[in-house]
Amino acid sequence: MSSEPKVDLEMAKAHGLSDEEYSRICELLGRDPSFTELGITSSLWSEHCSYKSSKIYLEEFPTQGEHVLHGPGENAGVVDIGNGWVAVFKMESHNHPSFIEPYQGAATGVGGILRDVFTMGARPIACMDSLRFGEVSAPRMKHLIAGVVRGIGDYGNCVGIPTVGGETGFHRGYNGNILVNAFALGLARRERIFTSRASGLGNPLLYVGSRTGRDGIHGATMASESFGEDSEAKRPTVQVGDPFTEKTLIEACLNIMRTDAVVAIQDMGAAGLTSTSFEMAGKGDMGIRLDLDKVPLREPGLSAYEIMLSESQERMLILAKQGRQDEVAAVFHRWGLEVAEIGEVTGDGIARIYHHGEEKAAMPIGPLSSNAPIYRRPVAVPKDLAQRQQAPEVPDADDLAGSLKRLLDTPEMGSKSWIWHQYDHSVRTNTMVGPGGDAAVLLLKGTPAGLGLVSDVNPVYCGLDPYTGGAQAVAEAVRNLACVGAEPVGLTDCLNFGNPERPEISWQFRECVRGMSEACRSLEVPVISGNVSFYNETGDQSIPPTPTVAMVGLIPDVANVARSHFVAEGDRVVLLGNTHADFGGSAYLRLLYDIEQGRPPSVELSREVQLAELLRYLTFEGWLHTAHDLSEGGLGIALAESCFTAASKGPTLGVGVEVDMPPTWLFSESQGRAIIAVPPEHLDSVLSEAETMNVPAVEIGGVGGQELVVRCDGSVLRAPVDELHRIWATALPRALDL
Amino acid sequence: MRCGVVVFPGSNCDHDVYHILKHVLGQEVTFLWHGEDSLRGSELVVLPGGFSYGDYLRAGAMAALSPIMAAVRRHAEAGGLVLGICNGFQMLLESGLLPGAMRRNRNLLFECRDVFLRVERDDLPFTRGYRKGQVLRMPIAHAEGNYIHHADQLESLEEAGRVVFRYVSPEGEVAAEDAAPNELGELWNVNGSINAIAGICNEEGNIMGMMPHPERCAEEILGNVDGLALFSSAVGALEVTA
């Protein structure tokens, strides 16, 4: 190992290992690690790959459920959706790369999550993206927004997987660290699921896909650090995407997985060949021998260290059955892809890595993973929490129409169609309800059933009370799914936080996970996969805690799915749930008065259960034309949004309602609420069903006309729908100076 | 009718077209691989949408040189039906089977949205199921759909009545390539095509290319069936929709 730099503690520290972690690896090996071994260790033990600061909390999540076939631990979770089909899905962050280089960062985020899904043998059929940007006026922000959206679009559009939903938020807490969370879902036959567990002594390891270059080296380590002033210098650690290769890789992999020539398959994601080969062997209690001279390189001269840690995209490792190599190679060659046999599975449990005739690494795989550090980091309640939680003064909304218009005129509340028009959301012809609704609805061709997909989180709530915020994200996702008649089958998450070595960040994390776990248990939604992204900080400024939840639900019959907007004049409008004065962390206070103060609305899980059951039942009966969840901006925003169709060219319909509450409460964000529009002939059935199921329900008015009219306690909000629509539809492009 | 859907590396609407022809219209459909030089008896050949070879060069430029395109050309010259949708239209232009070229969309962005089309020809094998002047709603999904052609040749294209579909307002008014957006910021001619051209045909009318995606609006459950008549016309199965 003479050609490599000598390793010492200082070098280990530069690789992000602590003193203690360095002694641990020396002890484990019984010697100092080689340079390549140090690189491997620092990647595998990085926060990003090892979950060392989050593991103890993640164990709280309920991961079992009647539909769950594979929970966390595989490339993606797997749930049974009936008729012999399974849904495979996961969400993952690509925050750090996207902040450094938004186009490639976001693009490769999509590529990576797609590989996690088709690696399992599933054909990807849908993507979603949860994006958090800073204020549009912040430095570089318009560039970041444009780049991220174009990156997601160019990648997803080219591979031909529709981006059917997601969410976009803006908050100054992300000025120095944006979030890009990418979700993908695939379908497979139940019996055709693949895992990454190696087996079979002597089986060959085949490398397929793009060549290995120097891009992305130490991406996993970068994602485990905060941003300093030198983040620009980290641009070379961002990978470069090639969606065309990904598309051919999808087809070739799904093709070969229909044969029985493949034992296991794993994509090369974070920490590249290192984590892929170590995980594959580790899961099967096997060893591996890798000959790095056989790895296809983009340029000559890469060292063993670089080859093991490169995060070049669109690469997979396939463990084939002995003697079936040619069969595998033929399929990949047909799709114009390269195949190289780079090693084999061995029985000694050791990873032996050769390059230029030298053994560059010899590491025991099991101990390396079982000895990975796990930390219970100190926690502390943030010092300013009590002060931030003090009940805010809530200014009265004297000019109701004005307040509504000002809210609709923010990037936060305005239509996000400028973003999702750049995403192909209709390819594959399964998209019954695309972006812009409460939840996306996908057809399952050949069956009457469909899937509902949604992603939710309110970072302001999480910042003010992480426990409630965590529970609220889960509850809102369930509510959104219920609005399209979907019963949740599982969720995946992307837990975005600051530096866990700071006690108040670890406290936020613990509390969010506790809130999510409790909501998951009450609402019976298992967590089947997910990802943790720490160190989302610049300087010592952390992002708001952002536990993004993406949830998938099953709709027994899509024929009756309600829309999130009004569809028929004369429909009766019913408000479900109770309204209180809930203004802590509300859009009303934050966007109109710049106040982020108070306790977020409490989440009554038993009420959420009842509301979701009622909405699903009413949908099943076919009694609903419209169902729309109340969230940010409360009843006022929900009514306005219901007047606009998601497709901007559709007709707009007005509504007139009267509610018994103080006028300002139109913008209260009490949880557990939704509005529904019901054909008059079903109104009695709907109200009586609500009573039976113990959900407060009040008929508040009817659909019709060209105005939004809300009467409450003597005040009247009256505005032409066309005007509101214009404000809402153009708010984001105007904010971006487009 | 025997239908063939060509699969190029990077095609991604191949399955959608197959689905409509096979499962909605009950036709005999086969996938044709780009590397082959036979259409295996297909009477209707569809070049589907997608990003053939990644479209890292001009869209459709590489695909136009695929072995299968020689077979497509022979088929077309013998009067066989050829339909190019989106990337398929771009290939027809790049291969010279239809005239003109594509530029980036006017706003330089990929655009996926519904547009309105006016039917200009109802006498083609592909459009017999429509009425001249009828306004259709159809999704587009492309970044390079800004059709352009030499002024004099454009004139002869128009004179020959070879424009099949034009981008229009919902009321059917032609949307000029340089029209200002409406108050919602929308353009009816999103990509900025000259003369609002969305689809054209050859002189004989057996080759047609169009940017919008009729295969994405051909089933009731998706809320729009404006594209179905195009396929049912082409396969001579109008009675299915009648």
Image: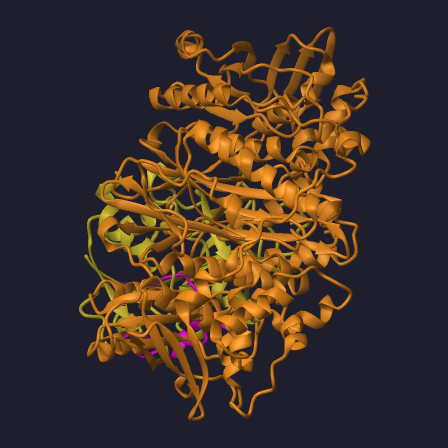
Range of magenta residues: B44-71
The tint chain A carries is orange
- Residue depicted at x 47% and y 67%: A243
**Residue A550 in the figure: left or right of residue A194:** right
What is the x, y in percent for residue A75? 40, 57
Q: Is residue A631 above or below residue B66?
A: above
Could one spot residue A608 in this view of the protein?
Answer: yes
Q: Is residue B228 left or right of residue B154?
A: left
Image quadrant in which you'd find residue A207: bottom left
Instruction: Pick the residue in front: B109 or A43.
Output: A43
Describe residue A42's horizontal placement relative to residue A145 as left or right.
left
Residue B49 within the magenta-colored segment of the rendering: yes
Q: Residue at x 75, y 34 (%)?
A: A385
Q: Is residue A573 above or below residue A9?
A: above
Colour convention: by chain
| Whole-percent x, y for residue B65 in the image | 38, 79
Chain B pictured colour: yellow
